[in-house]
Image (tube, rainbow, N blue to C red):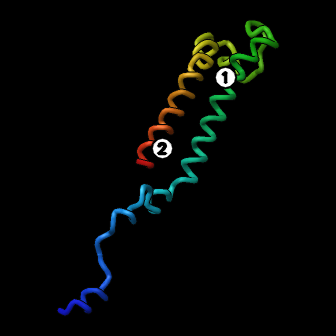
Amino acid sequence: MRDSEQASKPSTVLKPSLWRWNPPEEGQDARLLGLCLCLTSASVIAVMALNVFGRLFVDVNTYSTGVAVLDAIMRDEYYVQALPALIPGIVTYVYFNWLASQFFANT
């Protein structure tokens, strides 16, 4: 082959500048994952709100909603203290995870 014929053929090897961090085929389930994360977050926030704020407005030993699951959540002693204590650690973890991914992507 002559040099002019080799120059006209496209190269099949990707240059490093064309590599992608997230190829398009990896994000196909992103909407479903986002919906699952939102629903899980909403349920955790609802349980925590029932635990923390439910105790402020009613006496949980005598009050009954009639729904066994809600009554059990309101009478629970562990999550009243554990969930609010976990929030600063979770926020810190998420921030440092994001920071590390930014360092990795931009270096």
Residue 34 percent across, percent down from the top left = 58, 47
| Labels in figure, total | 2
Q: CA distance from mark 1 to mark 2?
A: 31 Å
**Frontmost residue, 38 versus 59:** 38
Q: Residue at x 24, y 87 (%)?
A: 6
Q: Residue at x 61, y 12 (%)?
A: 81
59 relative position to 45: left or right = right
**Frontmost residue, 99 versus 84:** 99
Classify 10 Å Cα crowding around label 1: few (below 14), some (14-19), many (20 and above).
many
Q: Name which quarter of the figure residue 45 lies in.
A: top right
Classify 10 Å Cα crowding around label 2: few (below 14), some (14-19), many (20 and above).
few
Badge 2 amino acid: Gln
39 relative position to 66: left or right = left
Which numbered disc covers residue 48? 1
Badge 1 amino acid: Met
Residue 75 percent across, percent down from the top left = 67, 12
Residue 84 versus residue 4 in the image, above or below? above
Q: Are marks 1 and 2 in contact (CB under 8 Å)?
A: no
Residue 106 versus residue 80 in the image, above or below? below
Camera-side mark, 1 or 2: 2
Q: Name which quarter of the figure residue 14 lies in.
A: bottom left
Q: Residue at x 62, y 41 (%)?
A: 38
Which numbered disc covers residue 102? 2
In the rendered structure, which disc, 1 or 2, sits on the residue that comes first in sequence? 1
Residue 84 percent across, percent down from the top left = 62, 18
Q: Secondary structure at mark 2?
A: helix
Q: Quadrant of the N terminus?
A: bottom left
Residue 25 versus residue 71 in the image, above or below? below
Residue 80 percent across, percent down from the top left = 64, 14
Q: Residue at x 72, y 24 (%)?
A: 67
Q: Name which quarter of the figure residue 62 lies in.
A: top right
Q: Secondary structure at mark 1?
A: helix
